[in-house]
Every structure is written in C-alpha cells, then in structure tokens.
Amino acid sequence: ACTSGGVITGINLDGGATCGDNNRVTNPSLTQTQRFTVNTDLIWTPTPQHLVQFSYAYDHANVRQTAEYAQIQASGWPTSYFSGLQGWGTPILGVDGAPLERRNRLTIAGLNQVSLEYIGKFFDDHLRLDLGARDPFISRNLNQYCYTSPPSAVYCTSFPSLGATGRVLPFTINKTYSQVLPNVGLTWSFDKAHSVFIDYTEALNAPVNDDLYYVGTIGAGGSTTTTPGALTVKPETSRTVEGGYRYQTSRLRYTIDGYYIEDNNHIVSAFNQLTQDSVDTNVGSIHFYSIEGQAAWVPID
C-alpha cells in the first residue's frame, strides 16, 4: 500500500499494482436500529364528571450507523444492496485487514417520561377542563469510532498516526434533556352543537443525532473549538396558544381557530463557508401566527 496526504490510497483489489489502480466502489449510509418501547396508563374515574390518568412511557433504541465500501460490478450494479455490510456483501479490506468505511458510530437513545392528566366537567357538563403535565427525560449515549475533522467530516482508520492528523480522536459523550411541560385546555359547550375552546401547550424537541456528533465550529472571529459535544445545539422549546369555535352535528361539522406558536432555540441547517460543511445552529425565537378552518358534510349515512 501507499499513502497520499495521510490517506491510504494503495488498496489492492485485483492482485495487480496498487497505487495506479482505479476502482469503482459504493458506500451507502446504513442504519440498523433495535428499539424497545413500553406505554402504560392508569385511569381513575371517581365520578362520571372527573377523570385522572397517570401515564409512563419508555423507549430504548440502539442505532448503529455505518457506511462500508464495496465494489461495483461490470454491469454497474453493486455486489450487494447493503454494500460491504457484514453478512450481506464483501467488504473492501485495508492493509490492516479492517473494512474500509466512511462512517462508524453507535447511538444509544433513551426516553423515560411520566405524565399526569385531569379532566373535569362542570356546570351540567357545559365546561370541560383539561389539566396535564409531562416530564420527558431524554438521554443520548454517543459513540464515535472514527476521527473527526471539525465540525463533522469523519475519517475512519485504524492507523492513529494517520487519523489524528488535524482531527479529533474517537470519543464517547453523553447528553441529557429534561423539562416539565404543562398543558391546559378549556371548552365551553353552549349546547350539543356549538362550543368554543382555548388551549395552552408546551413542547420540547431534542436535537437530532447528527447535531450531537459535531465536535466544533469556526465562528466569525476565526476561533476553533474541538471539544466533542461542547458546541452542540440546544433543544428547541415551544409554547402554543390556540382558540376557536366548533359546530358539530350528525350531518355537518366545521371548526375555525387561530393559534400562536413561540418556538425558542429554533434549529436551522446552513452551509458554513469557513468549514465547507453544513452546520445546524440555534437561531433564536421564531413566532408563528395562523388562522385555519375545516368542514365536513355527511349527505347520506
């Protein structure tokens, strides 16, 4: 084998020369997920007008992401749809005997969430009150097995002297997110057909896995940070207020409502000219205003 600029270029695929070979290869992004989920509810109705519900949700996912190289046949088709993935195709081995790949990481994602809800009806069932709160605890165990060029370009090799040139070493970090999220709803029914309602809801949106694997960014001042997880984006949080009018009979139903959403720490993806890579960034608050309506008519049963 021979090297050029710290990259192994002399992989012998046909038994002939190495550095002068040109080979057509493929390396699709592969994701294998094992997920386990539990959802439970405990409901108590002391009277027909009152209901209390306690819920617990558990989610555990092992997300294995790789991108092994494999050769292309003379016909132009890959030797395997899953490239060089073990058990599916024939990988291309480097001089160290390890498969060549452009991505290799494992994410263990977890969710533990408890929630409590109360529903009460008052004034001869004219008023319905919904009170609730949930507390999600979100965890991410991130295992990057490749070397990383800030902010997110990776180089997978078993040669430390080659991989560490201007790159961050393979790493393992943990991220957690948790916030109590309330919701309140009021509905006033004038009769069986006419009603008005108003709701308030808070939500939390954790960053996606790709965001959390960033190891650094180059800011406007030119400074570089290469600590894994130090500059990852913050989770998005939102507050929503909605109110409207609803008409509902067996033949005709329509609703008109308006809502306002305040989205904090909004995450956007943009191309960074300094790093020549797409980087996700928090851009602050975004406000949404809207009025919407819907209608349905049942002409026959």
Image (tube, rainbow, N blue to C red):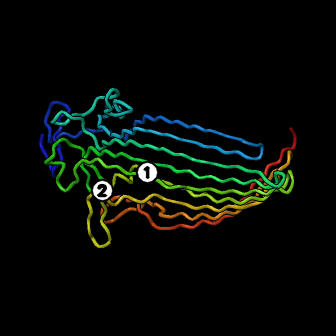
**What residue is rendered at 24% in x and 44% in y?**
156
Residue farthest along the top direction in this orientation = 87
Residue 73 location, x and y as percent?
Answer: 32, 31
Vertically, is 136 above or below 269?
Answer: above
Task: Please tell me which residue lies in front, 67 or 288.
Answer: 288
Mark 1 residue type: Val
Spatial CA distance of label 2 from label 1 is 15 Å
Task: Please tell me which residue lies in front, 11 or 205.
Answer: 205
Residue 110: give its label. Answer: none
Vertically, is 92 above or below 141?
Answer: above
Task: Please tell me which residue lies in front, 104 or 265.
Answer: 265
Residue assigned mark 1: 208
Q: Earlier in the sequence, mark 2 or mark 1?
A: 1
**What residue is rendered at 13% in x and 36% in y?**
17
Residue 90 location, x and y as percent?
Answer: 29, 29
Task: Please tell me which residue lies in front, 71 or 175.
Answer: 175
Q: Residues within 10 Å of mark 2 (few under 14, many from 20)?
A: many
